[in-house]
Amino acid sequence: MKKSVISIVDYGQGNLGSIRNMLHFLGFDSQITSDVQAIATAEKLILPGVGAFDTAMRELEKRNLPDTLHRRVVEDKVPILGICLGAQLMTRGSEEGERAGLGWFDAETVRFDFGKDDRKLPIPNIGWRPVKAHGDSDLMQGWHDPAKFYFVHSYYMRSNDPSNIAFTSSYGHDFVAGMQCDNIYSAQFHPEKSHKFGMHLMRSFANV
């Protein structure tokens, strides 16, 4: 059986090399690409990201990628994993900026705001946090130990559809740490920096 190549979308944002290195370590072929034709024929996609929401959307648009991604993901049902900012881009928009997101989830990206809460914590949320899987999350099937993943973020996803929530974590309050709907997966944390937990999740996605 021919092994599929996972295409890591390069739009100038994110830990592309780290993601590819983990996939290689796990025995999966991948390519880093911003080529429209390569993405239009990809069998699996990863949308990474680190940085600002509007900048990321602008860079995607500059490379003529949103329409191709939408067609491949929504119409052709190609599996895709959004990581960190890449996950947030899958929502309708962000409090961080003014541009519309890809809108694949009925969700918005909002900033941590602890207000006058006595438990007020520093922003961004940086470090290892326990993550709880919900429902039948494909990416954590077969995992029995308490999972911890590495986070670096000031914004998180607020879902309007509870059935799409795949992961939650807590920082001052519970928040959505990942979503799933059919072939579309997202993770607010960084699996490529999360050792055995991240390897399990990435392997599960590569085998979807």
Image: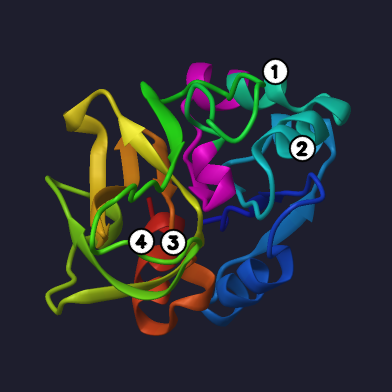
Measure the C-alpha gap from mark 2 to mark 4.
30 Å
Indicate which disc residue 189 carries: 3
Measure the C-alpha gap from mark 1 to mark 3.
26 Å
Disc 4 or 1, which lies upstream in sequence? 1
Do the CB atoms of the residues marked 4 and 1 lie less than 8 Å apart?
no
Indicate which disc residue 204 carries: 4
Residue 73 in the magenta stretch? The answer is: yes
Q: Which picture quadrant has residue 41?
A: top right
Q: What residue is disc 2 on?
A: 55
Q: What residue is disc 1 on?
A: 67
Measure the C-alpha gap from mark 4 to mark 1.
27 Å
Residue sitting at x 61%, y 53% = 6
Name the residue type under label 2.
Answer: Thr
Name the residue type under label 3.
Answer: Phe
Magenta span covers which residues?
71-88
Q: Residues within 10 Å of mark 2 (few under 14, many from 20)?
A: some
Residue 77 in the magenta stretch? The answer is: yes
Q: Nearer the viewer, residue 52 or 45?
A: 52
Q: Residues within 10 Å of mark 3 (few under 14, many from 20)?
A: many
Measure the C-alpha gap from mark 2 to mark 3.
20 Å
Residue 47: where, in percent of width, then height? 61, 46
Residue sitting at x 50%, y 33% = 78
In this picture, residue 46 sits left or right of residue 113: right
| Nearer mark to the viewer, of 2 and 4 | 2
